[in-house]
Amino acid sequence: MKLPIFLDNHSTTPMDPRVLETMLPYFTEKFGNAASRNHAFGWAAEEAVDQARKQIAKLIKADAKEIIFTSGATEADNLALKGVLEMYKEKGNHIITATTEHRAVLDTAKSLEAKGLATATYLTVDKLGMVNPEDVRNAITDKTVLISIMLANNEIGTINPIKEIGKIAKEKGVLFHCDATQGVGKIPVDVQEMGIDLMSFSAHKIYGPKGIGALYVRKKNPRVRIAAQMDGGGHERGMRSGTLAVPLIVGFGKACEICAQEMAAETTRLSALRDRLQKGIMAALEETYLNGHPTLRLPGNLNISFAYVEGESLLMGMKDIALSSGSACTSATLEPSYVLRALGVGTELAHSSIRFGLGRFNTEQEIDYTIKKVIEVVTKLREMSPLYEMAKEGVDLKSVQWAAH
C-alpha cells in the first residue's frame, strides 16, 4: 500500500489510465481544429468530438446534439442560470434554488440578484439535506423562469428527489436545471425520466481530465434556448463560442463510456467499502454522527462529525490521508460548512466534520488503514480536550457560563 492515500474523490479524481491513453494521439498526430471543415486534420478532430458527444449523451440518456461543451461544471452552472434568465427575461426573473447548492449555483444566483437581473428563493432542506418537492411547488410564482436543484450534494452525498421536482416543473411550465456534477457517472441519470431541461457536469469528477465539462440543453419538449455568455465564432450551436479542446473532450467521452459500463459493479464495491469505513469508525468511537441521508446517498460519500474534536486538527493528525472538512471550493475559509449549518448541525459539530470521498482506485487495505488512523487520532485529540473530559463527567457544556477574557 502506497502513502499518502487519496480519499478526497469529491474534490477531483485521478485520471483513469484508459482515458489518458485515448487522449494522447489528439495532442500530437491528430491536432486539428474541430471547426476546420476543409481538410483531413479538421475532419479527424470533428469526428472524435462527435464520437465523444455520443458517449457522453448515452450516459445521461440524451441526444448528442444536446451536449454543449464548457470548461467545467462551474461554467455550465453560470451558463444555465445567466443564459436562461437573459433569454426568458420577458417571461419573468424569478429563480428557485436551495441553500445547500454548490457555490457555482449560489454565487451565480447572488450575482444576478445584485445586478437586479433576478430575484431568488433559497429553499431550506430537511435535517438529512434533502429538498422537499412540495416546497419547490409552493415557491413557484408566475414570474418563475428556472428551478435549479442539485442531484447529489458534494459534502454530504444526499441525493435529491429530482424526478419529483422535474414533474412539478413540467406541470408548472418552468425550466428545470440540475447541477449533477457529483451524480453523473456514479448513479443512474436519465434526463428524460427525471424531467431535466438543463444539466451541468464535469469530467474530472469521473476519472477524466480537468478543464472540460458540459451543459445538457434539452432540444425538444420543451426546446430550451439560452443566451450565450461567451461570444465569438458561434461554436456549440451558438451557445458557447471558442475552439473545442479536442483532447479533453475525447477524454471526457471515454470517461463517460467507462462509467456506463462499470457503474453497477463500482456502486456495489464502493458502497461496501464505505459501509466498512463507517462501521469501523462509528463502532469504535462514541459521539460520532453521520451527516446526510443514511441510505439515499452517493455510494462513495461518508461525512462524519466527531464531537469535541476540531476538524482541522483531525486533518493535521492524518497527514498521510487526503480528506477534507467541507468542500474543496470553500475549504480555504475557516467558517464551518454552510451545508452542515443548513441541516441544522450546531457550529461545534459542523467544525468537527470530515468528508471521506471513496473512488474507483481505493482499496480495502487503504480503508482499513484509515479506520485505524481515525480512531487513533480522534482518541488522542479527545484525551487532550478539557471539553471532552467535562462532558464525560456529566457537565452540560451548553449551560456553562464561560468567563470573558
Image (cartoon, rainbow, N blue to C red):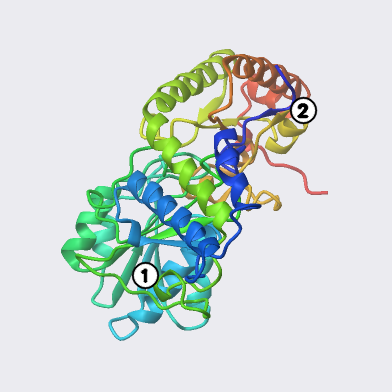
Badge 1 marks a residue whose secondary structure is: strand
Residue furthest to the right in view is 405
Badge 2 marks a residue whose secondary structure is: helix
Q: Amino acid at mark 2?
A: Gly
Which x, y percent locates residue 207? 55, 39
In this rendering, does residue 66 appear at all?
Answer: yes
Residue furthest to the left in view is 171
| Quadrant placement of the N terminus | top right
**Spatial distance from mark 2 to mark 1, Cα to Cα?**
43 Å
* Residue drawn where x is 34% and y is 61% of the image: 66
Q: Decide: few, some or many residues near mark 2? Use Cα within 10 Å; few <14, some 14-19, many ≥20.
A: some
Residue identified by numbered label 1: 95
Residue identified by numbered label 2: 317
Which x, y percent locates residue 29? 63, 52
* Residue drawn where x is 59% and y is 38% of the image: 21
Q: Is residue 108 above or below residue 400?
A: below
